[in-house]
Image (tube, rainbow, N blue to C red):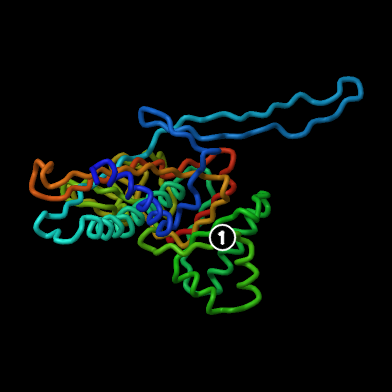
């Protein structure tokens, strides 16, 4: 079996592993909504139309318009890894260790990062509904979900395609109630997907692989405030020697010396997405090189690469996204 045949054989299997393990693959577009472009671009189908107008017995129908366009957007990120199995460590047939190595890599590294990046991008989209709240028990979770469903109902977001991403702990707190009320609120969502808290943040940092790999909850950064007056309950900081200290009693006269901490990742309680409100896409590639071709060692080399559109949220469908997070 040559190198190309091996890569061709395993890529569909890796795609299967990815789709089974991913919590957010339900948001991925198909050929009807997503087309691959070139130069790091991807085309997203966008449909919009005018509403009703008066019918005139003299002039007939109002002349509205329907717009179906392919909107070109940039991929968010390219990620990669170089996976190796030493020749002498690989006593079995190549397929067995590669299947285990690549499958585990997809399940434990690629999928969690991709889920986390997608959720973070959707949650940080301007214009969606967000609510900061600490949910301590099942009753509070039910009330929060009721507020979400009521908001979407009032905005006429279709019930039959609302996807709820929620942490296992919060889902369990609802199940433990086992009441008519708890069952009723869950019926307002077409799909309920449990996502570990480690993938549910409003912002993440993707490590570049020079010193650290994977991702982590975003720690944020300090930037000079642009406020012209003190904002009530907002935290301001002063800087001295690279150390930032919170200002206990901020004053307007000192505003030009203050900093704000922005971009901090916060724990997401749940995220509701109506399926047509956002779309995701991922392209995955692998290459294989035998130990005789390995120029850096004596290993079987499997190079993995992906290209991601973590999420594109349609500006005319933002009513279909609701994020509850812990302040």
Query: Residue at 63% of width from left, 29% of height from top?
Result: 67
Query: Residue at 68% of width from left, 49% of height from top?
Result: 156
Left or right of 242 in this view: 225: right
Q: Quadrant of residue 74?
A: top left
Q: Is residue 254 visible?
A: no
View extreme (right): residue: 57
State the image coordinates of residue 91 (x, y, percent, origin top left): 14, 61
Query: Residue at 67% of width from left, 54% of height from top?
Result: 153
Q: Is residue 242 above or below residue 187?
A: above
What residue sits right under mark 1 in the picture? 191
View extreme (front): residue: 1
Please state which of residues 314 and 25 is positioned toward the viewer in this rendering. Answer: 25
Left or right of 28 in this view: 162: right
View extreme (top): residue: 59
State the image coordinates of residue 249 (x, y, percent, origin top left): 34, 54
State the image coordinates of residue 61 (x, y, percent, origin top left): 83, 26
Please state which of residues 267 and 259 is positioned toward the viewer in this rendering. Answer: 267
Left or right of 199 in this view: 177: right
- Please identify the quadrant where the C terminus is shown: bottom left
State the image coordinates of residue 272 (x, y, percent, origin top left): 54, 56
Few, some or many C-alpha atoms within 10 Å of disc 1 (few <14, some 14-19, many ≥20)?
A: some
Q: Is residue 129 visible?
A: yes
Helix, strand or loop at label 1? It is strand
Q: How many marks?
A: 1
């Amino acid at each position: 079996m040559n190198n190309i045949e091996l890569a061709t054989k395993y890529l569909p299997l890796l795609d299967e592993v990815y789709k089974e393990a991913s919590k957010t693959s339900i948001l991925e577009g198909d050929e009807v909504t997503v087309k691959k472009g070139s130069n790091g671009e991807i085309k997203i189908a966008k449909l919009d139309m005018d509403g009703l107008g008066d019918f005139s017995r003299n002039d007939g129908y109002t002349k509205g318009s329907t717009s179906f366009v392919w909107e070109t957007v940039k991929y968010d990120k390219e990620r990669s890894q170089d996976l190796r199995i030493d020749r002498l460590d690989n006593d079995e047939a190549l397929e067995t260790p590669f299947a285990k190595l690549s499958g585990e890599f997809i399940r434990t590294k690629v999928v969690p990062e991709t889920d986390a990046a997608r959720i973070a991008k959707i949650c940080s989209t301007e214009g969606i509904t967000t609510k900061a709240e600490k949910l301590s028990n099942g009753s509070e979770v039910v009330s929060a979900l009721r507020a979400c469903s009521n908001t979407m109902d009032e905005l006429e977001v279709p019930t039959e395609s609302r996807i709820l991403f929620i942490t296992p702990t919060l889902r369990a707190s609802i199940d433990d109630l086992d009441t008519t009320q708890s069952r009723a609120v869950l019926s307002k969502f077409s799909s309920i997907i449990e996502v570990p808290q480690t993938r549910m943040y409003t912002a993440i940092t993707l490590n570049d692989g020079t010193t650290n790999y994977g991702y982590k909850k975003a720690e944020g950064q300090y930037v000079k405030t642009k406020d012209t007056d003190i904002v009530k309950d907002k935290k301001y900081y002063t800087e001295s020697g690279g150390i930032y200290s919170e200002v206990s009693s901020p004053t307007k006269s000192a505003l030009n010396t203050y900093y704000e901490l922005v971009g901090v990742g916060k724990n997401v309680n749940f995220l509701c997405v109506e399926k047509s409100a956002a779309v995701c896409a991922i392209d995955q590639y692998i290459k294989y090189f035998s130990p005789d071709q390995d120029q850096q060692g004596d290993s079987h080399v499997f190079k993995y690469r992906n290209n991601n559109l973590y999420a594109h949220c349609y500006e005319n469908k933002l009513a279909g996204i609701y994020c509850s997070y812990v302040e």
